[in-house]
Amino acid sequence: MMVKKLFFIFSILLFFVSGVWADETKFEASIPKQVIKGQSFQVTYTVINGSGQDLRVPDFQGCKLLYGPGVTQGSQIVSVNGRTTSQTEESYTYTLRAIQEGTFRIGAATIKINGKQYSTSPVSLQILPPDKQAGNTGNNPDVAATSSSDPEVFARLILSNTHVYEQQAIVASIKLYSRTQISGSGNYQDPTFEGFAVQEIDLKNISVDLENYQGKNYQVAVVRKYLLFPQHAGNLKITSGKYDLIIPVPRKVQGIFGPTVIYSDVTKTVSTQAATINVMPLPAGKPATYMGAVGEFSLTSTINREKLKTNDAVTIKLVLKGKGNVKFTKTPEVKFPEDFEVYDPKIDVQISGLEGTKTIEYTAIARHAGDFTIAPVEFSYFDPESKSYKTTSTPVYHLKVEKGTGGGNAAISDYTDKEALKLLNQDIHFIKLGKQNLKKDQSAFYGGIGYWLWYIVPALLFIIFIIVNRKQARENANIALMKTKKANKVASRRLKQAGKYLKEHNTGMFYEEVLKAVWGYLSDKLSLPLSELTRENVASELNKYGAGDELTDRFMNILDTCEFARYAPSQSDEAMDKLYEETIDAIGKMENTVKKR
């Protein structure tokens, strides 16, 4: 009896304690990627959920140790998605000073935790030169590339290459440089890439780094990134892009207790420089199997069977991997013998930046027995590095098809995708011969009410359809009206995506999506292009629609919050929830205001 009671008590304790359980043991390092010569900084090694012994740190090349290690300990309980975890932290902090310019490799640190050795990964540390005196820009040819006259904040278009072949990929990045604080952004106009196929690279997290440019150190962030594929030879122009930035400017005012400094937001427009790309035509001598690919590629294939029976399916999978214009290449084709019934291929394209994979599945059904050969698939591409055409191919496949059972009416299936069964020789039935005795069917339907309704009702429905269709055509022709009607639906789709980012705690993408939703909604609802939207004309247009000052201020606050959060992303989940609800409510009230009109 006592044993049962003890077991029951132990089960209850285990049930409650299981909700608060420590995560796995980790050993991590926190080291900045860039520092400036002469600057002091800290390197921290942290043991999570454990107690460390015998810590061994690497040599900090290019740096001088000022102090360390300083040891701190702490614990916290974290609840995420209903799962509560207890976490302890033991930190070792070293204070260093950068004394030598260059890029240095900081090796791994090691420590023993509960008798087991843990280590960090080696990292790279870049020590930048300090700022030069004003006016000393040296002979840097990049000086003319900056289109902003303000040395404190400007934007640049960075191109990976300006002399390329047709279809050769170019990475275009828009960098924002700043030596002052930026509290938000306003209207923007990206460069235009006429003559290029453009593939925007999704920047999930925008990081801020240090960069020494023209003798000064700036905080730098890549705010846009594109892959450009020139479509024809010649000098292709890239226009300048423009971006509005909100910068807090200090101003001295006389307060009750004396002079004080307040900050006023000032909007500054920065522009990227225009650029010209020299695009060369592809050299002569293209192979017959050239598929329009430029870059570096490989082609492999697999087959699911080489021995089968008639009415069985065979699948050949081609995998094209490459670094270049994978998305825009033609699809290689498998040539099956005429005795096979071939279905349309299934194509799946996965792109990650400049690299990608195109998977093509060909399925065919053998209709006759015999020995068959499937010829190799050849894929030719142009390699800009070697300036030559190259060809890769798949192996030859030999199929042995035996006669199956079930005769001509056998039901066969596609074993690769489990699609519906297909029946052979069932589409045309035998025509009955001989003299037939045909009689006229005497029906009471002819000449009755039902007979006439059979003609009148479709005619009425057709007339109604014509009237409704013409009305819909007139509305569709009014683009501004259609955008206004669909503004709420488009905004709802974006807010739904923002809600997913909210659940994933992806702060940067959440605020980006909410900002796009609000600007897009206002653009469609007010019938104003995005390029013409400003805070001033949005406020005046909202007033024309009957939106009061309170609703107008709510939209402005939402925009300000999103703009600020993009450059200061450390926002709490509670703040994100509140902004999400506030945005939905503001759009809903705007819709009610429009309906009342």
Image (cartoon, rainbow, N blue to C red):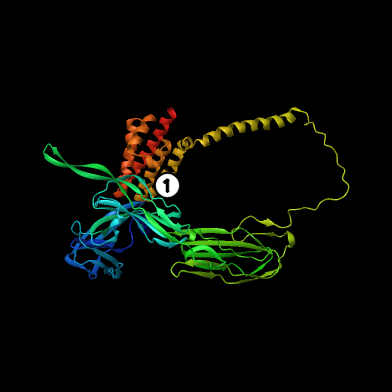
Q: Residue at x 26, y 64 (%)?
A: 126
In the image, what residue occupies the spot 36% across and 49% down? 241
Viewer-proximal residue, 544 or 312?
Answer: 544
Q: Quadrant of residue 46?
A: bottom left
> Foreground: 82 or 497?
497
Q: Position of residue 91 (x, y in %)?
A: 23, 61
- Residue 207, located in which quarter of the rendered image? bottom left
Placement of 61 over or under 170, stated as above or below: below
Quarter holding residue 276:
bottom left
> In the image, residue 464 lies at what x, y percent?
62, 31
Whether residue 298 sits left or right of residue 102 in the image: it is right
Q: Is 259 left, or right, of 53 in this rendering?
A: left
Q: Under tag 1, what secondary structure?
A: helix
Residue 498 in percent (x, y) is at 40, 46
Q: Quadrant of the C terminus?
A: top left
Relative height, residue 365 to residue 475 (above, below): below
Can residue 444 be spotted in the picture? yes
Q: Nearer the viewer, residue 581 or 559?
A: 559
Q: Alpha-carbon neighbours of circle 1 within 10 Å: few (<14), some, or many (≥20)?
A: some
Under mark 1, the amino acid is: Gln
Say which quadrant the N terminus sits in.
Answer: bottom left
Residue located farthest toward the left when viewing the structure as drawn: 258
Q: Position of residue 401 (x, y in %)?
A: 68, 69
Can residue 74 be seen here? no
Q: Residue furthest front?
A: 234
Q: Which residue is mark 1?
A: 497
Question: How many circles with numbers are drawn on the protein?
Answer: 1
